[in-house]
Each structure stands twice: as C-alpha cells, then as structure tokens.
Image (cartoon, helix red, strand yellow):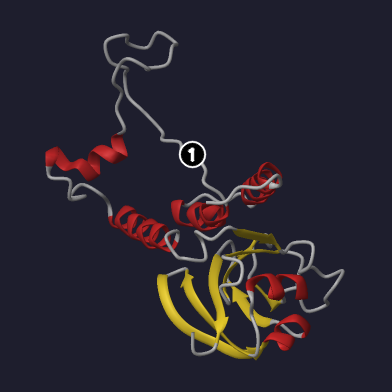
Amino acid sequence: FARDDEAPARVRIISRESRELGVESLEAQAHAQAPLVLDEELPALLDRAGVEGFGQDDGRTSIFDYWSLPELSKWVNGGAFDGGLLAADQVALRDFYADLLVLTRDASALGAGYWGLEYHNNPANFADCPDGLYSFARFEPGSARAMVVVANFTPSQAASGKIRLPQELVDAVGLAGDLTVRKVWDVSGTVVSVVGMVTSAGLVSGGFSVDLPDQRAHVFVLSTTGR
C-alpha cells in the first residue's frame, strides 16, 4: 500500500476509537479494526499461550525457541490444515478475514492515492453526516474509480448519513459525468450491491447514503458508469 506522512496519526485515531467502544466479541473487534487493513500495510500481532519451549518461562522472548499458538493449532488440526478443530464462530471469523484480504488486492486499494475524508465529512460541514462516521478513499489517480471505506465509531448505536467527496478528490480520481456507487463489502463479507447512481457534481454537493450498524465498516466502489 502507499504510505504517507499522516499514517501514524490515522492509525492512532482508528485504534483509539475502536478501543473506546469497549467491544468484547471477536466479530465486533474485527469489524472495528477492519479499516486499518485497507488504510495501511501494518504488522499483525499473534497471541501466544502455554509454557515456552526449551528456555521455559524465563521472562525472555522466544526468539530462538518455539511457543504454542493454540488457536492456530486448531486450524492446523494435526497436520490436516483444514480448521477441523475450530469453533463455528472462529470459522466465520476466518471467512470474514478471507473476504477482507481479497479486497486488499483491489486495484483501487493498491493505487497510489490516499485521501482522508474525516476533515470533510463531519457535522461541522454537513448536518446530515454524523460525527461517528470515519471515512477515507483509496484510488489510482486518473483511473475514474475509487474505493471509499466508511466505518461507524458511534458508541453502541447504528449511524446513517451522507458521504461526500471534495471536488479536489473527484478531479484527482478522474470521476466525471454519471457515476455508479456499489457496496462491495459489509458485515456479511463480500457483496455486490448497487447503492445508487449520482453525477460527479452530485457526489460533491449531495454525496451518497450510508447506513452502518454499530461498530461496523462498509466498503464502496465509485466509478464512471459503464467502466
């Protein structure tokens, strides 16, 4: 993914807001953190458990040793690598991440352009955009196609409103004329749903509607109609 100077600040904002939600379930945590996957190329941390290997529990890390990853071991399933020991909710969570990781290979997600939309889509600018919606765009400049990620960080409630793109972003992407807005990912995973049609001028002035459940994120693709 393309990096930029604002990356550390964006990561802190998303991480802080998702933690403040007080989410407990794996599913809720995954959806609250999902925007990070499409925002930046970030390292993943794995939780370990059980007694350390040769060095035992000596207070040191296990750099040259082995340790147990009990949940991964359930997927390994004695060498079958089929997830046979995973619980149903763990299988669903794995499928969720599989869909999300496929989305990271989208042409717009891999594009050189990133545009944070928090400064633009907020109640101070538009009364129909609630404060709890966090949004940003990924795109290849001049491609006439953009991916817009919208997350709901409103504590303990659903959020709906309008997401608009500033004219400068519309010009950078190359969006012109009639546009199609499609939702490509939501709480169920990969979807293909036409949200609506809008002109490039209408995208700037009126935007497109979003309706997100509590602690969830949706991903939209905006493109020139017919492309």
- Mark 1 Cα shell of 10 Å, populated few (<14), some (14-19), many (≥20): few
State the image quarter where residue 191 is shown: bottom left
Is residue 180 found left or right of 175 in the rendered image?
left
- Front position in the image: 50 or 13: 13
Position above or below: 24 against 45: below
In the image, residue 187 lies at what x, y percent? 47, 68
State the image quarter where residue 126 is shown: bottom right
Q: Secondary structure at mark 1?
A: loop
> Which residue is found at the position 67% from the left and 51% from the top?
17
> Which residue is found at the position 32% from the left and 11% from the top?
56
Is residue 152 found left or right of 82 in the rendered image?
right
Q: Which residue is mark 1?
A: 43
- Front position in the image: 113 or 29: 113
Which amino acid type is shown beneath numbered disc 1? Pro
> Which residue is found at the position 69% from the left and 85% from the top?
200
Q: Quick one: which residue is furthest to the right in this view?
A: 124
Position above or below: 105 against 207: above
Position above or below: 79 against 155: above
Is residue 213 found left or right of 184 in the rendered image?
right
In the image, residue 213 lies at what x, y percent? 57, 70
